[in-house]
């Protein structure tokens, strides 16, 4: 008998510093939170990632240019800016992944320097659905790595927001080229209603 494939949701970096009032606020970031909250029950497992940098992280700059991947100080481990946005629903028995913890290395992907691949495999998850912040950086790299690790990878297009429109458009093209399928929260809710 074939095991059914279990489905995991990866919620990337929905943290205060990436939302309005944060040090690296992504435009319109908060509008994805109610969308994410409604789809959480559709999944067998929910993995939340946190950008979690030491105060001396290599990406931090007093004069950040963004385009060269230098950023203002953000998501310092343990700080208020690194906490989840207070409106984000945290599923019961959720898994939290901390990334970017090495001071000398940038790590956009949730698989980079973490045990995420093992955790997904241990939970029997072969299909991963990705949402969160930011489309053009951590969402993109997480999705591309998921494909690289042979997960069937989906992008929830109404539950992501990017730093810039131009780089987000390119990110969507790059992800599409690698076989990442776009879905909407509505698709997920409909199929969950039909096949709970
Ligand atoms: C991110 C820039 C720097 C992200 C994290 O979550 O996309 N972007 N650190
Ligand atoms: Zn970061």
Image (cartoon, rainbow, N blue to C red):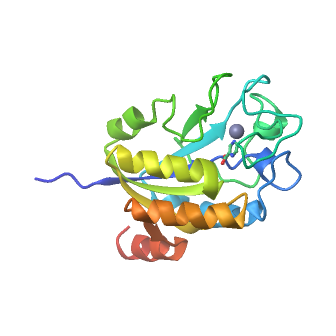
Q: Residue 65's x, y, as percent?
A: 81, 46
Q: Quadrant of ligand 2?
A: top right
- Residue pictured at 62% horizontal, 56% vertical: 136
- Residue pictured at 60% horizontal, 33% vertical: 99
Above-or-below relation of 77 to 124: above
Does the image show residue 163?
yes
Above-or-below relation of 33 to 149: below
Classify residue 173 as left or right of residue 71.
Answer: left
Above-or-below relation of 192 to 80: below
109 or 45: nearer the viewer? 109
Classify residue 11 as left or right of residue 71.
Answer: left
Q: How many marks?
A: 0
Quadrant the C terminus occupies: bottom left
Q: Residue 14's x, y, as percent?
A: 69, 50
109 or 66: nearer the viewer? 66
Above-or-below relation of 31 to 134: below
Does the image show residue 160?
no
Q: Residue 110's x, y, as percent?
A: 53, 40
- Residue pictured at 77% horizontal, 28% vertical: 78
- Residue pictured at 76% horizontal, 47% vertical: 66
Q: Please identify the quarter of the rendering in which residue 118 is found.
A: top left
């Amino acid at each position: 008998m074939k095991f059914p494939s279990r489905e995991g949701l990866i919620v990337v970096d929905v943290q205060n510093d990436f939302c309005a009032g944060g040090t690296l606020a992504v435009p319109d970031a908060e509008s994805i939170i109610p969308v994410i909250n409604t789809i959480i029950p559709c999944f067998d497992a929910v993995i939340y990632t946190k950008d979690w940098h030491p105060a001396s992280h290599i990406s931090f700059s007093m004069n950040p240019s963004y385009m060269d991947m230098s950023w203002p100080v953000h998501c310092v481990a343990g700080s208020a800016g690194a906490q989840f946005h207070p409106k984000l629903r945290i599923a019961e028995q959720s898994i939290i992944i901390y990334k970017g913890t090495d001071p000398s290395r940038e790590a956009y992907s949730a698989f980079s320097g973490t045990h995420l691949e093992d955790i997904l495999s241990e939970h029997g998850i072969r299909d991963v659905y990705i949402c969160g912040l930011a489309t053009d950086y951590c969402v993109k790299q997480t999705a591309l790595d998921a494909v690289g690790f042979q997960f069937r990878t989906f992008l929830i297009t109404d539950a992501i927001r990017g730093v810039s429109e131009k780089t987000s458009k390119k990110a969507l093209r790059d992800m599409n080229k690698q076989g990442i399928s776009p879905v909407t929260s509505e698709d997920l809710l409909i199929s969950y209603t039909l096949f709970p």
